[in-house]
Amino acid sequence: MSELIDNRKLKIEQLTAYALGVLDGENGAELYRQYKTVLETAEPRDVITVVDALVKTNEEMDEIKRAVNKILNIFYEALKSKGKFEPRENGFLYFLMKENREMEKRMDRLRARVKAIFKEKDPKNALLKLKDEIKGDLLDLQEYEKHYAKKENIFFPYFEKYFEDFRCLKVMWSMHDDARRIIKSLLGNLDQDEPLISQFNMEIGKLYFSILPLIFREEYILYPMANRTLLPVHFEEMLLQSKEIGFSYIELPEGFSFGDDAVKKQEDKALESGLIDLGTGKLNVKEISMLFNHLPVDITYVDENDEVKYFSTPKDRFFVRSGAIIGRKVQNCHPHESVDVVNKIVASFKSGEKSVATFWINIKGKFILIRYFAVHDDSGNYKGVLEVSQDVTEIRKLEGERRLLDWK
């Protein structure tokens, strides 16, 4: 056993040395010759550990992504030789992979249109003729957001909890964001009367290199390792939590059940028991939960240890949340590029320098106000952060007065 451990350790050291050499810009051909033998033996768990090591260097994420892309091109054949992962039918990973097959069909359809454009003598004019069709294809690709949302808010938290080398997920999340930005930019270009053909050509290529490699990395690296690491009950929980987000492009089998009836009965029984003295009244847990969920805001509470402790479930939610994030570090709930800002807000709250941080964004025609409040106990001790998000689109339009007696 000790020999196996030593061999594994040496293998990881060599693979990591190769990866760090790529990150540092060393001669790629020379690196490959030096580590060729070990590169040909790469397995999913090796890749995860090596990418984790790259993220730990704290280099810029764009540099890490460039290195990861080069490394995984080298690892491609070794990973593919391990065979395709076959998930349990009608399980969480099974449905994620079905979404991938549907996404590939849509990417093929888009590729055919793009090829038709650049076969023409005047690609610019051809793009104008096919503009509406391509725009429709891109809007259809945005349905895949549900796939990314399930990964980021359900799958990633479980993987982080049970797999030590989880930082590879930061790279994948950043690549999700790349795909999102590229689609948005392509749509913006096509909204012009005369789209820029050079910009379109460049970005459509980037789109393929953003989406399709991610599918391979999911199915040949992440999913096999998750299947070996997590328990069947974890995947059942993930599937149940997917119900609210939904699935991209696919219909669930007729008569399919998420198995949530028994869970709901247990939750209802727990919620109905006991009264809690709130100082200005006594309510049971079910009543408290009901009140929070009827407020016209999203609420998320992160405790003094930076761990998510609670989120409300209003009827209309702006941001995806799932039970998998409970106990998750707040830093892991955000894309890598925004973690520094999150840390600055939390640090300013802990130090007492600030107690409120306010932001506002536009989402699908809605103006969303996002506010973070420092939480302290009666003795002034820092107890965490309360995030409150509210759709203020209609509130911003209010003028004059409407008194109680004016209501009809």
Image (tube, rainbow, N blue to C red):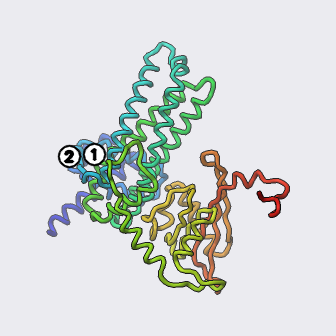
Asked which secondary structure carries label 1, the reply is helix
Question: Which x, y percent locates residue 193?
Answer: 63, 24
Work out whether mark 2 precedes mark 1 in sequence or the reverse, and give the earlier one.
Answer: 1
Q: Which residue is mark 1?
A: 75
Q: How many marks?
A: 2
User: Is 79 rendered above or below residue 7?
Assistant: above
Say which of 354 and 63 sits in front: 354
Say which of 51 and 375 sits in front: 375
The single residue placed furthest to the front in the displayed view is 408
- Can residue 17 be seen at all in this image of the molecule? no
User: Is 256 rendered above or below residue 206?
Assistant: below
Residue at image coords 27%, 58% = 227
Q: Quadrant of the N terminus?
A: bottom left
Quadrant in the rendering for residue 365: top right
Say which of 184 and 166 sits in front: 184
User: Is 266 rendered above or below residue 140?
Assistant: below
Q: Is residue 290 left or right of residue 146?
A: right
Label disc, if present, on residue 83 of the rendered structure = 2
Question: Which x, y percent locates residue 375?
Answer: 62, 75
Residue at image coords 44%, 65% = 323
The residue mark sitting in front, 2 or 1, is 2
Q: Is residue 194 left or right of residue 87?
A: right
- Can residue 163 be seen at all in this image of the molecule? yes
- The residues tagged by marks 2 and 1 sit, at their Cα atoms, a distance apart of 14 Å
Q: Are marks 2 and 1 in contact (CB under 8 Å)?
A: no
